Amino acid sequence: MSSKKVAVITGSGDGLGKGIAERLAQDGFAIVLSDINPDTLTATEAEFKARGAAVSAFLGDVGKREDQFALVKHAADTFGRVDVFINNAGIEDVMALEDVREADIDRVFNINIKGVIFGTQAAAEQMKKQGGGRVCKIINACSIAGHESYDLLGVYCASKHAVRALTVAAAKELAKHKITVNAYCPGVAATKMWDRIDAEMAKYIDTKPGEAFEKFSAGILMGRPQVPQDVAALVHYLASEDSDYMTGQSLLIDGGMVFR
């Protein structure tokens, strides 16, 4: 059993999730990586082990309730407890609303909404068992799209608005168990997700590769798109004891794009 605090991060094979896992490993957490892609998951686990991190990996689909509960069981069996659970996994959808079909809604909502609900259920069950007076943390990936809505991203925006609502509801229900629930809301990041958004938007607005990304990032007050380390710095705070008195919040970390 590990004496370290334990953090579980879904969707951590690459992108923002990997950056968050790297930061929490630096902070001294034992890390449980989880992803649906076996290749990226295996490669990232190997990187962490090469750096001497306390790490384990779990292959799973966050949209399946049994996978989320199995993930938490794996974390508890491996390291003895779960202190922080991060519902980071998410997918995007670029489509005009008039083109949206049931399968498109299900694809996004299964991951972005069901994944958060099932992850919260599984994490809370384990955290309640632990006791000991330590505040545990559930941290959700929201987005600027949870505060604002964008054309061609309607289904994605709806899913992230739902994440904000779930964050507040879970915070109210779990506070009595010393479990806080907060969310981080990234903006425009140079990740594979934005590569896909850029490519799909070109089908609707006749842009060249990279132009949609440039359009969305042009107005960032800090003068650059964000990198995973920017988001990871906020999650570092939310996962730390310094945030023990904060719950039910969805914090923007976008370099100055959306203001609430």
Image: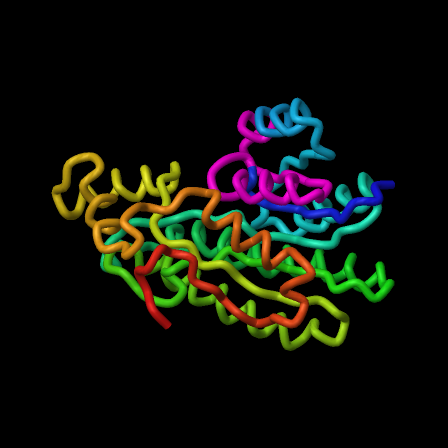
- Residue at 38% of width from left, 67% of height from top? 147
Whole-percent x and y of residue 43? 58, 24
- Which is nearer the eye, 58 or 245? 245
Vertical position of residue 180 compared to residue 34: above or below? below
The magenta-colored residue range is 13-42
Quadrant where the C terminus is found in the figure: bottom left
Q: State left or right for residue 147 relative to residue 82.
A: left
Whole-percent x and y of residue 189? 37, 45
Whole-percent x and y of residue 103? 40, 51
Q: Quadrant of residue 125?
A: bottom right
Q: Is residue 88 magenta?
A: no
Quadrant where the N terminus is found in the figure: top right
- Residue at 60% of width from left, 61% of height from top? 117
- Residue at 30% of width from left, 44% of height from top? 197
Vertical position of residue 159 compared to residue 62: above or below? below
Q: Is residue 29 magenta?
A: yes
Vertical position of residue 34 compared to residue 84: above or below? above
Whole-percent x and y of residue 56? 71, 34
Vertical position of residue 154 compared to residue 227: above or below? below
- Residue at 61% of width from left, 49% of height from top? 64
